[in-house]
Amino acid sequence: NADLALYQAKERGRDCYYFFTEELNTKALKLLHIEQELRHALQMDEFSLVYQPQVCLKTGSISSIEALIRWNHPERGLVAPDEFISIAEETGLIVQIGEWVLKNACMQTQMLQQLTGQSIKVAVNLSSRQFSDPNLEQVIADVIEETDLNPKYLEIEVTESMLMNNIDKVIEQLNRIKSTGSTITIDDFGSGYSSLSYLKRLPVDILKVDREFVRDIPEDLNDMEITSAIIAIAHKLNLKVIAEGVENIDQRDFLVINKCDYAQGYYFSKPLTFEDLYRFFTAEQLKSA
Ligand code: C2E
Ligand code: MG
Ligand code: MG
Ligand code: MG
């Protein structure tokens, strides 16, 4: 609350007042600057996507890839999404950036399917602003039409926290997304506080166990209990489950034993450029040939 901060600062005296206004100005200016940079980035094509394989634990094959955005900043180099997505969200630019991501992810996946002859799915992250956009269904439908990707290969990832609003509205929006033919994954599952009765009502397809619970397996007994419980709940609700942040073989083995369906993490592969992904797929094909 900026006004309140200013008021309190004024009460405390002149120096404080200057201190606070300057800080607020600096923050506003910085935001404005990054906003201009992001706008510029869209025009200049500075964004790119990397893709992280998601592996089916039953067969060991890649079932899906998650599209993750990168910003190739002319001076700062490769910028990670954690550094700019929230600003894009605050300024509203996320809507345009999100559309760019959706379109390019679908286009490249369609291309990868053509090149490899394999039915690979693609997972695309939505921000909360995109999720509350009444036009979202149309945006997705247009991209599907334009890129010619069969929508059954498109997985929309929403985080658990985005769903903890008016449940009827949330269900409505999820159904609109699903009406395009795509499926829905709840990302970072377990990091929010949705109740089981709430979860039961949501028209979703996959739960993605938050990295937080996977990280300390097999040292942390609680995390192992939580992870195996989430897997069991998902299956009881007829959902598939994927674990993210799998970094070592112990974690993979634990997930296999507990019947987790899919896994994603550095143990299998880091996010790859489209080029490297293509090479990865052709190498796999050669190995299994
Ligand atoms: P997320 O959707 O949960 O994506 C997983 C993140 O974990 C990615 O970070 C990925 O590189 C990282 N990761 C994968 N495997 C491992 C592992 O084994 N260990 C560890 N420590 N980390 C691993 P990234 O690419 O930096 O993305 C961070 C977040 O930014 C994403 O979290 C997602 O919430 C957001 N994001 C990324 N791309 C987009 C996008 O196109 N649109 C929106 N709205 N958000 C995006
Ligand atoms: Mg994700
Ligand atoms: Mg995640
Ligand atoms: Mg996460």
Image (tube, grey):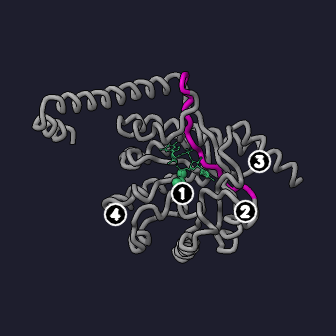
Q: At label 4, which amino acid type do we have? A: Ile
**What amino acid does circle 2 point to?**
Ile
Principal secondary structure, stretch drawn in magenta: strand
The residue identified by callout 2 is: 249
- The region drawn magenta spans 61-76
Q: Is residue 280 magenta?
A: no
Q: Earlier in the sequence, mark 2 or mark 3?
A: 3
Q: Residue at the far left: name it.
A: 11
Element under label 2?
A: helix
Q: Position of residue 195 (x, y in %)?
A: 39, 71
4 or 3: tag closer to the N-terminus: 3
The residue at 70%/61% (across/down) is 56
Secondary structure beneath label 1? strand
- Residue 100: image location, x then y, percent: 51, 35
Hey, which quadrant is residue 272 in on the image?
top right
Please give the residue where the numbered disc 3 appears in the rendered image. 117
